[in-house]
Amino acid sequence: MSKKETFFKHITEGYTTKGDFIPIGAAMLNGETITGAHVKIPLKTMNRHGLIAGATGTGKTKSLQILAEHLSDKGIPVLLMDIKGDLSGLSKPSPGHPKIDERHEKIGLPFEAKDFPVEILTLSEQDGVRLRATVSEFGPVLLSRILDLSDAQTGVVAVLFQYCDYHKLPVLDLKDFKKILHYATNEGKEEFSRTYGRISTASTGAILRKIIELEQQGADLFFGETSFEVDDLLRIDEDGRGYINILRLTDIQDRPKLFSTFMLSLLGEIYSTFPEQGDSDRPELVLFIDEAHLIFNEASKPLLNQIESIVKLIRSKGVGLYFVTQNPSDIPEAVLGQLGLKIQHALRAFTANDRKAIKLTAQNYPDSEFYDTTAVLTSLGIGEALVSALDEKGRPTPLSATMMRAPMSRMDVLSDTELSELLSQSKLVAKYNDTIDRESAYEMLNEKIERAEAKEAREKAQKEREAMIKSASKKSTSTYRRGTRMHPVVKVLTSATFIRSVFGILTKMMKN
């Protein structure tokens, strides 16, 4: 048996699957595509997470697009983070091209142009379904980790949340949270001291500065109502295909704090609300996180620990996470070790550090008698990738340099007119795009402060009236006493001696 025949058998047996699967291309040997040696990803292992990596322009986005299309076709909803703005074309069929036909002939798979059900989402003021969450939904622990607070500051945040829960003060947006923060060390200082002990102004000041930093990245647009319900990511269209939810993030690349805040909120909400799936034959939802380094580079150690925990646990909910980045080194080791599928596009070596990084990357893949992994990593062409997956029993499949199939949808963005038409058909825009600013902690505390100030003013006015009355009473008594006091002349005229003298004179006059 020739080396080529041996390799064909090695690949076809290694990628044999009894259940449903996604065909992503055909294996390559020495730069030649082996027609019919199909590389297939079992649907059962798509909740084991994955990595799509490679240098700019090597085809990472197209690999993401291929996986999203096939998942949708099999009734599995998808959420894509579209930071570069080039995924909206999924809603339109591919126009086709002779090079696509040539590629598929080499692979041995038919090509079919298709469009897919797409929902456009946004975190900012861009067009799309607005995604929001309330501060209360984050809770004190998650909010503290996002703000990178100390233990003492985290304790203050926990106290504030407890106070708001007890007094039924909804904390919906950052305006509400800043108000309770201010209230705790000013107007409500005595109230808090009686119940929780004194809250340091140094701690509240530090927390406030962290909030302002988050606001400057646009978090004031994210926190609030109407809060997005994660079940709306699980919609299926009338043809049984899963919706591809595309989150537009083209204006958020310089705001990684907001991006990581959203991602952690979303993953936490999914984990807390989705039911346990066990070892199911298919995922319930698959998330693709493009430019994943934006999450990890800006994350504090507590935040990284939170992400690592969610990555480990969330697959039990039937959710797959796929990180898309230029280099596997962008992903923390603890997370990288949880990624069952790896699609590694070409890496370029321009410096000594680049060559060192490529050698380290090669160590992430199984040994192969057919490949020098380090050499292959630098020689792959556009639309080619090293693939390592898991079979249905969770075992690594053979390492395969793979000619990737072409996307069935358009590999380009929608025009403004096409985007407007797509949004006009959305059922979620009407549900989430009206901003609601109902009465919450900000208004309630202002009202409480106003009532307290009004009561204080009334009490002060009452005391002033009482003081005035008391003063007037004293003045009146003093005047009365002065008014009834006898004049010295009157005292003389009314004395007993004077009266006797007058009676004596009168008596003499009568005798005469």
Image (tube, rainbow, N blue to C red):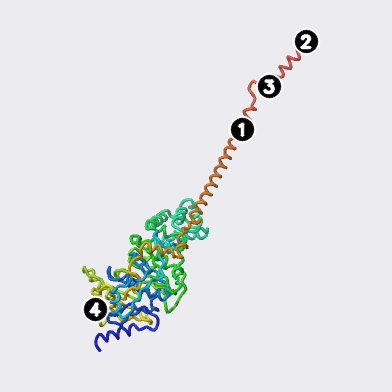
Residue 127: x percent and y percent?
Answer: 40, 61
Q: Is residue 14 visible?
A: yes
Cα separation, mark 2 vs mark 1, equals 53 Å
Say what amino acid the circle numbered 1 marks: Ser
Please give left or right for residue 446 compared with residue 50 in the image. right
Q: Evaluate if marks 4 and 1 touch, with contact meaning CB atoms under 8 Å apart.
A: no
Residue 205: x percent and y percent?
Answer: 40, 54
Cα separation, mark 2 vs mark 4, equals 167 Å
Q: Is residue 209 above or below residue 40?
A: above
Q: Nearer the viewer, mark 2 or mark 4?
A: 4
Residue 259: x percent and y percent?
Answer: 37, 63
In the displayed image of the protein, which residue is found farthest to the top? Answer: 512
Say what amino acid the circle numbered 3 marks: Ser
Cα separation, mark 4 vs mark 1, equals 114 Å
Cα separation, mark 2 vs mark 3, equals 27 Å
Residue 203: x percent and y percent?
Answer: 41, 56
Q: Which mark is residue 476?
A: 1
The first of marks 1 and 3 along the sequence is: 1
- Closest to the observer: 504 or 73? 73
The first of marks 2 and 4 along the sequence is: 4
Q: Which mark is residue 79?
A: none
